[in-house]
Image (cartoon, grey):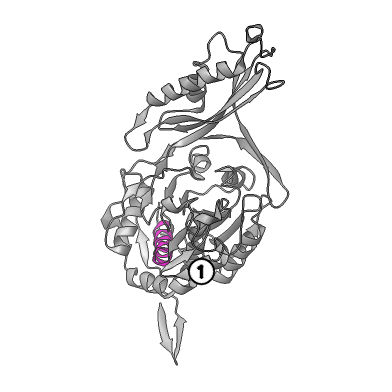
């Protein structure tokens, strides 16, 4: 807690504030969570409001496209060291991985630190990388998506260091790279190459301080058509690949209308996002074409089912193949790494113990339960939960409508509240006795 000593405000360590006892099937009963230190956590987080805003400002000022994150990675690593992390390292892919504590229960809090391009600067009313703090917001590309989450978890480390890290907890803070190019790639590396497999991951993607428990998956599919060229004056002598592709594209339009619907995640979808053709000349029948499909997968839809649905659109006139694309990229460290562009759908049940714990932590801290919802976009959860089966919940500062939008910004109030939530969750998680 904060006390005044000879005119100075100093931090005094607090005892372990919250204790969680074994959860019963179906969730964590409210009576089993002890949160006597709510006021101290809120007080400490609010006292650091200006600090967390400045941390985010420093991160926003460093442009960090996928594969070009070195400057922001090193800044985040410095912030984590200054906040009191026990260990801070950068892995071969370029992810920042910090550790606090050394207990048996392992919690990770994740924020990707790469950002998309600013797009048309004429659509921005301020400098995209200014990091300006104005009118209660931090302004700039990445403020919401999602460097705000990183600034908040750094501040959570500082608070945890002052209140005391539970003996049962190991907390990892991950500032991950290349997510915008290939969501989940970074965590595929963390699990498969770094060998880190937490019991739970909190994603700090923007949720407007609501608690999220899933989102639709996606898959990138390409259909490649092969035709036979002929002179344009006698098209009957050839086989036009564009016509084959066009028929399949119209079939994709119809397919979109009959895809599955999940009550929580919503409807699957598919659309043609690119159509490319080729011919020996503009006076010739096209002998090649390809279409790119953006396929969003709801619950129960898989790689195999999505590919089969597209293959069923091909008729006997087509000489075509359906391919699931692969991503292959070079990290800022120079390491080359890749994966198939299949990003599985995932969700946790609303009564899952990790979700229930988040609801109770929020209620105890802020007086009301959070809205439990889902993201519309995709996150690193596609590999963390979708491929590796590790539970994921989402809680982050900022509004997801700001993601990839001009005039991106994050409320300063969201930052300190998110930090407080991460502290509260870590204390509850680390205090569990199995």
Q: Is residue 263 left or right of residue 278?
A: left
Q: Position of residue 254 (x, y in %)?
A: 42, 22
Q: Is residue 81 left or right of residue 171?
A: right
Q: Is residue 113 left or right of residue 33?
A: right
Q: What residue is rendered at 66% in x and 17% in y?
A: 287
Q: Residues within 10 Å of mark 1 (few under 14, many from 20)?
A: many
Q: Position of residue 326 (x, y in %)?
A: 62, 33
User: As displayed, is residue 280 above or below residue 30?
Assistant: above
Residue 314 covered by magenta stretch:
no
The quadrant holding residue 358 is bottom left
- In the rendered image, which residue does mark 1 sit on? 132
Principal SS element in the magenta part? helix
Q: Is residue 45 visible?
A: yes
Q: Position of residue 120 (x, y in %)?
A: 55, 52
Q: Nearer the viewer, residue 146 or 45?
A: 146
User: As displayed, is residue 321 above or below residue 91?
Assistant: above
Q: Which residues are magenta?
A: 412-429
Residue 418 covered by magenta stretch:
yes
Q: What residue is rendered at 68% in x and 48% in y?
A: 331
Q: What residue is rendered at 45% in x and 32% in y?
A: 297
Q: Is residue 340 left or right of residue 416?
A: right
Q: Position of residue 242 (x, y in %)?
A: 59, 19
Q: Is residue 23 visible?
A: no
């Amino acid at each position: 807690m904060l006390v005044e000593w000879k005119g100075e405000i100093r931090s005094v360590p607090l005892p372990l504030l919250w204790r969680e006892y074994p959860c019963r099937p179906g969730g964590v009963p409210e009576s089993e969570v002890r949160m006597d230190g709510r006021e101290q956590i809120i007080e400490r987080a609010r006292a650091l409001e200006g600090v967390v805003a400045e941390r985010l400002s420093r991160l926003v000022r460093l442009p960090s496209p996928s594969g070009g994150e070195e400057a922001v990675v090193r800044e985040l690593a410095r912030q984590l060291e200054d906040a009191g992390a026990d260990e801070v390292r950068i892995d071969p892919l370029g992810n920042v991985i910090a550790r606090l504590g050394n207990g048996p229960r392992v919690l990770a809090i994740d924020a990707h630190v790469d950002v998309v391009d600013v797009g048309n600067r004429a659509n921005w009313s301020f400098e995209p990388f200014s990091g300006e703090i104005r009118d209660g917001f931090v302004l700039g590309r990445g403020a919401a998506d999602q460097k705000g989450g990183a600034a908040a978890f750094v501040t959570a480390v500082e608070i945890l260091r002052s209140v005391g890290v539970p003996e049962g907890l190991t907390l990892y803070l991950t500032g991950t790279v290349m997510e915008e190019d290939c969501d989940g790639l970074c965590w595929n590396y963390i699990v498969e190459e770094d060998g880190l497999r937490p019991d739970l991951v909190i994603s700090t993607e923007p949720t407007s301080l609501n608690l999220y428990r899933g989102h639709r998956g996606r898959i990138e599919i390409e259909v490649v058509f092969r035709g036979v060229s002929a002179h344009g004056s006698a098209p009957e002598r050839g086989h036009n690949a564009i016509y084959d592709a066009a028929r399949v594209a119209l079939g994709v339009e119809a397919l979109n209308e009959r895809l599955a619907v999940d009550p929580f995640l919503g409807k699957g979808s598919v659309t043609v996002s690119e159509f490319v053709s080729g011919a020996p000349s503009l006076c010739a029948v096209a002998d090649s074409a390809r279409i790119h499909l953006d396929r969003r997968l709801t619950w129960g839809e898989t790689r195999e089912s999505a590919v089969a649905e597209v293959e069923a659109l091909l008729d006997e006139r087509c000489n075509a193949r359906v391919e699931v694309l692969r991503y292959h990229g070079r990290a800022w460290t120079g390491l080359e790494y890749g994966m198939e562009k299949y990003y599985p759908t995932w969700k946790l049940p609303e009564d899952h113990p990790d979700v229930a714990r988040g609801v109770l932590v929020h209620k105890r801290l802020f007086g009301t339960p959070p809205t439990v919802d889902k993201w519309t976009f995709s996150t690193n959860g596609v590999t963390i939960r979708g491929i590796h089966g590790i539970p994921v919940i989402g809680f982050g500062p900022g509004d997801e409508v700001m993601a990839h939008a001009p005039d991106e910004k994050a409320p300063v109030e969201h930052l300190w509240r998110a930090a407080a939530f991460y502290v509260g969750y870590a204390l509850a998680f680390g205090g569990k006795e199995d």
